[in-house]
Each structure stands twice: as structure tokens, then as C-alpha cells.
Image (tube, rainbow, N blue to C red):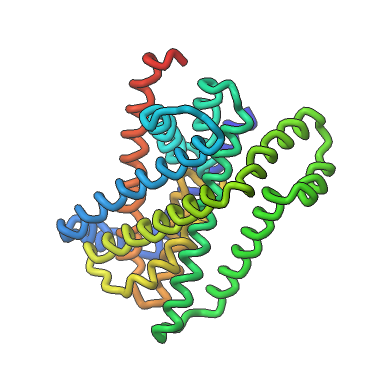
Amino acid sequence: MKSFLSFILKISISIALLIFLFNRIDIRHTVFYIRAVEPLYFICAVLLFLFVIYLGIARWEILLKALKHDLTFGRIFISYCGGLFFNVFLPSSIGGDIVRTTDLALHTKDSSSIFATVFLDRVLGFVGLVLVAISGFLIGHICGLDYDFRLSLFIIIFTAILICIFAILFSKRIFNLVNKLLIFKTLKNYLAKFHDCCHSFRFQKTILVKTIFLSVILQASYAAVFYLVGLSLGIKLNIIHYLIFVPIIGSVTILPISIGGLGLRDNAAVVLFSTLGVAADRVVAMTLINFAFLFFIGVLGGIIYAIALYSRRL
């Protein structure tokens, strides 16, 4: 009952955010922009988005293989598809992560290490997000682009959060201090196993470098998807702006207070792109198209996952 009420609350928040946004724009203009997209840029955006999905699967496969899980790419792909579906239809991306963990844990009989790879996959995505935002910010300053000081503050805060996460994951001393604050012994034991799996990557620098590199390429490519969608709508901005703004928008949608980030993504994008003089109705057209990408790939992922259920006997 509690989870149901939470789900209803998050749907309500998404609807409220969208109503607030649609009251500030001319919806007819937004629909016009969407219907008038330039086909070439749009097709390139779709293809690049599919490449982003492939990079995400490839990164998770590397982590799983590093922990000696002998899984085929097809098996990992199917589990990832289930995660894509629940990422869209459950609050934030937590639902998809739980599905991925449960699905492969039933197959491998090792829930703690699977959870470790899923969590690390999420952390590495955040690493790539922060690195792309910092790189874009520095390149922008070198190129003479001026930004609000609040962007610098935002990047500093998320960099600090990232450092704290790494300290907990890869330092036994810091993890033990945090773990002592927990009450339930069963949870402590489970987290200890989880931490051992994460801590083992500290000595696999090649794996970490490879996955961080993939994360940077993934996040930069996703920013390029927004850039191409923007071009298809007639938004002509330097791609450097997208390298800074899209990671910030992505970090906002991580907050588990809406469905699939809907409403949060759009309002954050309007606030950021309005600083560059882009009309809000055009920005909303861009975010809705990107949400449509997520929605359709989520539905497709759900269909693939459902079809594979019988053959996997889950």
C-alpha cells in the first residue's frame, strides 16, 4: 500500500510539473516544432541514441565479466532490456536497477555481486556525467563562452558527491565507519559482501579505466543526441552548451520524485536553455522528443524481456 501511494504521488508530481510548464508556453508552437523536425538530423539522433544504449550494455558486460560471471551478451542484453522498461515506467531509474539485479541474481545465484555491478554501472554513469560536464565547462571558458556562476557551483557539488561515493566504495575504513551506523545485522552482512565486490575493482585499474572511458563516450554521445534533436528543431547552439547542460539535466532526473524524470527533465532544460535565449516552447519540443526516445526504447525493451521470460523459465 505504501509503495502504491508513493507511485501515485510521483505521478502527481510529474503531472503538476508538466501543468506548470505548459502554462508557461504555447503548446501549439511546441506541436508545430515537433511536426516540422528536419528528417536528417532526427534520423541521426535516433541512430546515435541506439549507440548510447549499446554502450550501456557493453559497460555492464565488462563489469560482470570482471567478477567472473560467464554470461553471454544476449543474456545481458535481455536483462538490460527489462531494466530499460522499468526505468521508464517506475520512479527514477531505481526500478530498472532492481529488475536487472533480480533477473541475473536468479540466474547466477549471487545477488550481492550482481547488485555490485549494477550499482557500479550507475556510479560510473555518474562519473562520466560529471567528467563531461567539467570538460564542457572548461572548453567553454577556453572558447570564451560565459556561464552563470551557479553552473560552477553545481559542478563542484556533484564532484564532491562523486568523491564521497568513491571513498565509501573503495576504502574499507570509511565503509566500516558508515556500516557501523546501520542497525540490522543481516543488512550489514549483505552490504559487506557488496562492498567486497566493489572494493575488488580497486585492484583492476584496467577495468576501471575502460569503463570510465566508455562512460565518458556514452554521456558525450547522449549530449550529442540532444544536440541533433535541437538542430532538427532549428535550435542552433554550440555543442559545448549541450555537453554542460545535458549532464546537469540528467543529474536532476535521477531524483526519485517523478516518473521517468518526466516534468523534471523539461523544467530543468527550460531553465538552462533560457539563459541562452532559446524559446521555452522549442526547448519543451526537444525534451519531449528525447523522452519519446526513452519511452519507445523502454517499450521495445519490455517486449523483448517479456518474450524471453518463457525461454528463461523465470
Q: Name above or below for residue 302 compared with residue 261.
A: above
> Residue 314: in sight, yes or no?
yes
Q: Position of residue 69 (x, y in %)?
A: 51, 29
Decide if residue 189 is on the left or right side of residue 286: right
Q: Name the residue furthest bottom.
A: 144
> Residue 16: in sight, yes or no?
no
Could you tell me which residue is drawn at 54 percent across and 57 percent down?
Answer: 127
Q: Nearer the viewer, residue 31 or 256?
A: 256
Q: Position of residue 215 (x, y in %)?
A: 46, 54
Examine the image and state in which quarter residue 227 appears: bottom left
Examine the image and state in which quarter residue 110 appears: top right
Q: Position of residue 236 (x, y in %)?
A: 26, 73
Q: Nearer the viewer, residue 285 or 82?
A: 82
Q: Quadrant of the N terminus?
A: top right
Q: Name above or below for residue 146 compared with residue 263.
A: below
Q: Position of residue 259 (x, y in %)?
A: 48, 43
Examine the image and state in which quarter residue 281 appears: bottom left
Q: Nearer the viewer, residue 149 or 132?
A: 132
Q: Nearer the viewer, residue 29 or 187?
A: 187
Decide if residue 27 is on the left or right side of residue 105: left
Could you tell me which residue is drawn at 77 percent across and 28 percent down?
Answer: 186
Q: Name above or below for residue 261 compared with residue 284.
A: above
Could you tell me which residue is drawn at 28 percent across and 64 percent down?
Answer: 230
Decide if residue 156 is on the left or right side of residue 171: left
Q: How many marks?
A: 0
